[in-house]
Image (cartoon, rainbow, N blue to C red):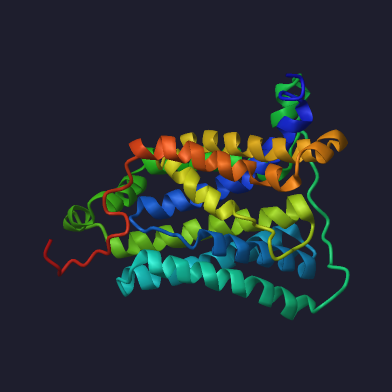
Amino acid sequence: MGFVFDISLLQLTMVMMAPLIIACLGEIIIERSGILNVGIEGIVTVGSVAGFLGTFMMGSPVLGCLTAMMAGGILSLLLAYFAISMRANQIVVGLGIFVLGLGLSPLSYRLAVGVVQSPPQIKTLSGVPVPLLGNIPYVGEVLFRQNILVYLTYFLVAAVAFFLFKTPLGLRLRSCGENPRAADSLGINVTAMRYGACVVGGFFLGLAGAYLPLLITGTFTDNLVNGRGWLALMLVIFGRWMPLWAFLGALLFAYVDAFQFKVSSLPQMAKAVPPQFLLMLPYVFAMLVLVKVASGAEAPRALTRPYDRESRE
């Protein structure tokens, strides 16, 4: 039981949680407008290479994050164009962006860095203890001795929840995902709202990708994202399109991910349990929970449905 609640394990859980919830928040914003983005894995992957290259070439993690956010916004804008303006099948478009992102990321990396034996490294962000709060026994050590991007996730979860459910603009966005024809009849520009949601959500997805080299690896590899985009997509369903519930889900899955990482680092466990088994634990756990939770989840009613004000329903 001591290992289960070990401080270092819980600190690692918070580190693993941040990219999941940032990507999940971006996906919630997009889906609340009525657009399904199944290209999330590709967008996060592009964000990771853009964040790494931006930081490596400009020497600033802030500029690296901004580069990643712009890359994520551009790819999401491509999704918006085909899904909204062209009224194409959103699943087909999303899968196309997924494949595009997986191919574009290593190509961009090799064009910028070349083929090298030793991949370039960037300095990962270190923890910044919060004064007073970081000194609280146990809780302070886990929550308030983290890096700046983990602190940012605390703010983003509250900010997105407040925006969606406490502001007029958030109400308009949700109405576009529930009943776009009724929203249009009230003077809401459904096209503009959906475009805006895709771009802002893309910024979140790009930032989630930049987190991985800046905090976890210090470099870029082809399999860096390793399914985290798909996990974030699943967390949207787990959280029932609610930021706070998605945050709790991200903590749960990040804990399983951190647990397998810590267990695999123990010499006695490395010999007894195949590493492939430990690596699959988070995804098996995600599948089992999703089967249980998804049955009662209700998506926005207009999700995946293109809106044409001239059409008859």
Residue in the picture at 43% in, 59% down: 37
Question: In terms of image quadrants, where is residue 283?
Answer: top right
* Residue 144 appears in the rendering: no
Residue in the picture at 56% in, 54% down: 229
Residue in the picture at 63% in, 57% down: 209
Residue in the picture at 63% in, 44% down: 18
Residue that lies at the very extreme toward the left in this rendered image = 312
Give the side of residue 191 with respect to residue 236, left or right.
left
Q: Is residue 251 above or below residue 275?
A: above
Q: Is residue 103 above or below residue 55?
A: below
Where does the image place residue 32, in percent across and percent down from the top left?
A: 36, 50
Report the label total: 0
Where does the image place residue 250, in percent across and percent down from the top left?
A: 56, 39
Residue in the foreground of this view, choosing between 169 and 233? 233
Give the side of residue 310 with respect to residue 107, left or right.
left
Where does the image place residue 146, in percent across and percent down from the top left?
A: 74, 37
Screen quadrant of the N terminus: top right
* Residue 251 appears in the rendering: yes
Where does the image place residue 41, in percent across and percent down from the top left?
A: 55, 60
Residue in the foreground of this view, choosing between 66 and 34? 34
Residue in the foreground of this view, choosing between 172 and 301? 301
Screen quadrant of the C terminus: bottom left
Residue in the foreground of this view, choosing between 185 and 217? 217
Question: In terms of image quadrants, where is residue 259?
Answer: top right
Q: Is residue 218 above or below residue 127?
A: below
